[in-house]
Image: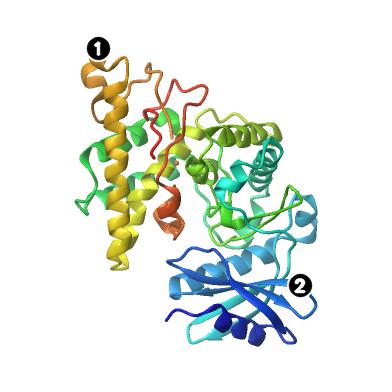
Amino acid sequence: MKRSPMELAALASAAVPGLSPTGVCGAPDDPADFESALLIDDAGKQWRVRAPRHAEASMRLETELQVLRAFTPAVRAELPFLVPHVAGTVRQGELRTFVYSHIEGATRSLEELASGGPALATEVGRAIAAVHELPRAIVSSADLPSYEANEVRQRRLNELDQAATTGRIPSDLLLRWEHALEDVSLWRFNPTVVHGDLHEDNLLVAAGRVSAVAGWTDLSVGDPADDFAWLAAAPDAQFADRVHAAYLEARSDASDGHLLRRASLAAEFALAQWMVRGLALNDETMVSEAEEMMASLSADLAAEEASSPDAADDGDDHHAGNATADNGDTARRGRSTDNSDGHNGREADRSWSHHESLETSALPVVRLS
């Protein structure tokens, strides 16, 4: 049953002794999994309450609790942003609602982030780099998964097989994603700590800076490209470029030449994952949304192929998005099925614009409207 912000405020009061909310409003979150609200108490402090909609989402919050406990004072001190603390919890049946302590800052839409200028883009890039520089011990101490590069690729292939069995994926997209996953060179990267649920709703901004990063429910060691997938929906491609440039400057290991291509693939494939998740939840709205966006992506790919100056000469080399390694067109964004949540549907409907060094991807460039 859907809970109102007032009901979430009541749960927060039960979770944190002495908390007296004087104001409450809804907060953006992953709608398939969580209900959230922001509270103001009688001292003017802000709190966030996050309630799971089902048992799986509740387990993700339990996982986040373990992650936040693994952020020792020494680790927190090295970060350029703050990480939340769990102030209290309250259980209702098998579901546990969490209340997080006040951190200065507010979320901004992706459009607001993109229009915030080069300095804010640099802040976002440095924040992502700091996540990827975290010690792997945080992941292992929270008993979370760690994947090598080939394991990441194999998991994606398994997810593609699962999506294909639904019979609802356009054949050109299946072929396109299969070709990208079979391009072994695309999947040579050094695994890092990955936030796994990074998007605008989990970044807090104050005074033009990324003041905090929240939503640590899907931490793992894996593909750093996953934390860039959300940027594919940015209305200004320059924003993604600036974020990436700042990231490369801040990283101690910036040797991954195919990061944006894998992020592009993740962004596109998130549509299939959203559909599979909708089928599992018997949510026809989710399924319809995913099918509509996949149809749009397929149509845009066909238009991109038809308008390519090389289309007439290359013949079958461009069929169903099968660009060769010599083709100057490439590209584009999402996440894996075990990390699929509500924001995938709204993020995964666009592609990267043209980037530098595009010569090795199997994904042609397309930007969806």
The reply to whether residue 188 is visible in this rendering is no
> Outermost residue toward the top?
313
Residue sitting at 53 percent across and 58 percent down?
218
Q: In front: 64, or 50? A: 50
The disc, 1 or 2, on the residue closer to the chain's N-terminal end is 2
Relative placement, left or right, of 352 versus 271 is right
Q: Kindly state the secondary structure of the residue where label 1 is placed.
A: helix
Label 1 and label 2: CA atoms lie apart by 64 Å
Q: Quadrant of the N terminus?
A: bottom left
- Which residue is drawn at the image coordinates 26% and 36% (left, top)? 175
In the picture, the quarter occupied by the C terminus is: top left
Residue 227 vs residue 295: left or right? right
> What residue does disc 1 label?
313
Q: Is residue 345 above or below residue 175?
A: below
Q: Is residue 271 left or right of residue 69?
A: left
Label 1, residues with CA under 10 Å away: few <14, some 14-19, many ≥20: few
Observer-nearest of 99 and 367 = 367
Mark 2 = which residue? 45
